[in-house]
Amino acid sequence: MGEAVTTSATRTDAVRNIAVSVRRVSMAYPAVLAVDDVSFELAKGSFLTILGPSGSGKTTLLQMIAGFQAPTSGEIVIAGQPVQSVPAYQRSIGMVFQRLALFPHLTVAENVAFPLRMRRFDARTIPGRVERYLDLVRLPGLGNRRIQQLSGGQQQRVAIARALVFEPDLLLLDEPLASLDRKLREEMQLEFRRIQRELSVTTINVTHDQREALIMSDEIIVMDRGRIQQMDRPQRTYRQPANRFVAGFIGLTAFLPVEVRSVREGVARLRIGGAELQGTVAGDDTLLPGGAAEAALRAEQVRVATTGAGLRNLDTVLEGRVEDVIFEGERIVYEVLVDGFNEHRVRAFDHDPALHAEYPIGAHVFVGWNVRDLLVFPA
Amino acid sequence: MTDRSKAVVLWLLVGFSVVTLSAPTAVIIGASLTSGKIVTFPPDGLSLQWYAQILGAFDLRAAFLRSLYVATVCTLIALPCGTLAGIVFAKHRIRFRKGIQVYLLLPFTIPLIGSGVGLMLVFGAGGLLGSLWPVGLACCAINLPFMIWAVAGSANALDPDLEKAAANCGAPPVQTFLTVTLPAVMPGVITGALLMFILALNEFLVSLLLVDSRIVTLPVLIYNSIRSIITPDLAAISVVFVVVAAMVIAILDRLVGLDIFLKSK
Ligand SMILES: Nc1ncnc2c1ncn2[C@@H]1O[C@H](COP(=O)(O)OP(=O)(O)OP(=O)(O)O)[C@@H](O)[C@H]1O
Ligand SMILES: [Mg+2]
C-alpha cells in the first residue's frame, strides 16, 4: 500500500521540480521529541534556512536528511527517491559540518579530492576538478597546504569545496559560520550565496542567526521545540510572523499584554492600562472581544521624537519617558515607558544616527508607529 | 610562593627525576666498560673486552635473536587485536563495559607469576610448550591492555563528525575506517606497538615458566647466569638492551616524528 502511494508521489515530485520533500517526519529520543511531525518541500535550486533556538531540532532534522540517523516515523524523498533504505554514503548530499570536520591528515587538495575518489570519478579528471573547485571558493594554488596551515575562513572554503566538488543533488550546512567572527561571517554569507547561485545547487542551511537567515535564503523555516512554526519567504517571515514565537524570535520585539475591545476587518481595537490602541490581527487568528491578547511591536518600526509634529505621518502617536538608552554603535535602542501603559515598555531604534542626537534617560519624548506594524496575537 | 622559588622547586623535581631515572643506566654503562673481572662502579680501568666477549658468545647471540623474535610475534598479534579493541572500546557504548574495564586493569592487579602459571597450564594442555611463538602470544596476552589504552586514548580524541564526513563524501564503512579512523588513531597504534615490542623484549617472569633450555630468551639467560656469578658481560648485555630500545625510538622518530605523540590530543 505504502509502495503505491510513494510511487505516485515520487512522480509528482519529478514533475513539480521538487528536490527534497520531508513528509511527516518525527524523531523521538527517550526523553524528548526532537523533531515533531515536520513536513516541507523544497524546489530545485532554492536556498532554505532552518532557523530556531538551541535545542529546537535543527541538527536532528539535518542529520536525518543526510542519513546519519533514521527518523522514528515519516518519510524523506530526495530527487524523487525515498531514501530511508539508502545509507548516508550512497546519498548524493554534500555537507558542511559545524566544526568543518576536514581530514587533518590530508592536504587541502586531498580533502577536496576525497569525495571524488570515494565516488569513483575517473582518476584522470580529479586533479582538474579539484583545481576548478578551489578556484570557485577562491583558494587557487593552496592545494598542497596542510589543513592546519589555513586560517579559519580558508578552512571554511575548503569544507565548501569538499561538499560541492562531486555536484551533489543537495547541499546541507549545519551552522558552519557560527564559530567565525562577525566580519568574516558576513563575508562568508555572501560567498555562500554567490556560489549557491553560480551552481544553483539546492541548499538547506541551519542557523540560529536571524540576520543570516534573512540575508541568505529564498525560504525560511522557523522551528521551535521540534515543530515548524512558519515556512515562508524572508520578507513575509519578517513582516507577517505566523505566531507569537516567530514575532519574538525575529527582530527586537516588545510584547504588550492587551485586552481586545472589538475586531473589524483585521483591525483590532485594544486597551492596555488606561490607553486605547489599534493593531492588526496577525495571520488568520481569531480574537474574541473582551479576551486577552498580546501585541507585538518591533523596535525598528517605532519612531522617537521630541515633538508630536515630528511623527505626524504615523497612525499612533503617544507620549512617554525614556527609561533606558542602549548604545549599539550604528544605532541606539531606547526603552520608552508610554504614559498609561503601566510598567510595559516600548522599544525604539534611533533612525537618524547622522544627527548624533541622543535622548537622555528621563527625557520626555513622543513615540509613534503604524497600525499595520502592531501585530496582535491571541494570548 | 614567588615565581622564582616555584621555578627552583620545579627544577629540583625535574632534576631528581632525571637523575633517578638515568642513574641505573649510567652505572651499568660504566660497569660494562671495566677492564677488571668483576662488576664495579666506577669501573676499574676502561676496555671493550666484555663487549667483544658477548659478541663472541654464541648462546647470548642466539638468545638475543630469540627475544627479538618473541617481541616481533607479540607485536604482530597485538597490532590488529589491540587496535580494533581500542577503537571499539573508545567509540561504542558496548555491553560488558565494566567487565572490560576490569580486564584492562589486570596488568596491575594480577601478579605476573599468576598469569605465567596459568598460561603454562593452558599451553601445556595445548601441547604448545617447547616452541617459541607461544611465548610471543603469552607476552601479548599479558600486556595487551597497554596497547588498548594507547589506541583508546587516540580514538577518544577523534571527532565523531570526521567519520560522518567520510560517509557523506561517499565512503562505505570499511573505507571510512581505513582512510579516516585508522590514520586518526595511528599515534596510539604506534605508541602501543612500540610499548608491546619493548615489554616483550624485556619480558622475564612469564617467559621463565614457558621456555626450556633449548629456547631461552635473553632475559631468562641473564637470570640463569646471575645465579652463578655476576660478571661484567651482563652489564654489557644490558647496555645492548638500552641501545636497542633507543634505536627503536630513533627509528620511530625518523618514520613518523616524535611530535606526533605531543599532538595526539
Ligand atoms: N543523541 C541524542 N540523544 C538524546 N537526545 C538528543 C540527542 N541529540 C539531540 N537530542 C535532543 O534533541 C533536541 C534537539 O536537538 P538538536 O541537536 O537537533 O537541536 P538544535 O536545534 O540543532 O540546537 P543547537 O542550535 O543548539 O545546535 C534537544 O532537546 C536535544 O537535547
Ligand atoms: Mg545543532
Image (tube, coloured by chain):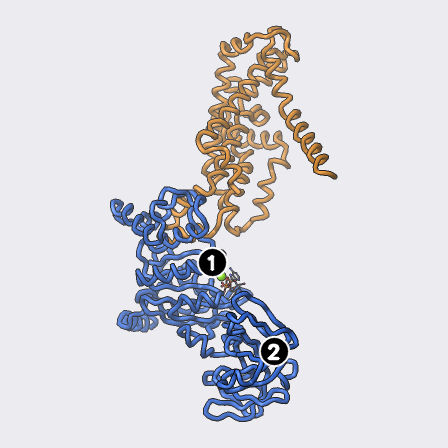
Chain A colour as displayed:
blue
Q: Which residue is mark 2?
A: A336
Q: Residue at x 34, y 56 (%)?
A: A164
A160 on left or right of A365 = left
Against A220, is B191 above or below? above
Work out whether residue A7 can be spotted. Answer: no
Where is residue B18 drawn, in percent x and y?
64, 27
How crowded pointer 2 is (Cα within 10 Å; few <14, some 14-19, many 20+) is rated as: many
Kindly identify the amino acid type of the residue bearing the numbered disc 1.
Lys
Against A369, is B50 above or below? above
Q: Nearer the viewer, residue A127 or A72?
A: A127
Q: Secondary structure at mark 1?
A: helix
Q: Nearer the viewer, residue A33 or A290?
A: A290
Q: Which residue is mark 1?
A: A183
Q: Secondary structure at mark 2?
A: strand
Chain B colour as displayed:
orange
Q: Residue at x 57, y 12 (%)?
A: B233
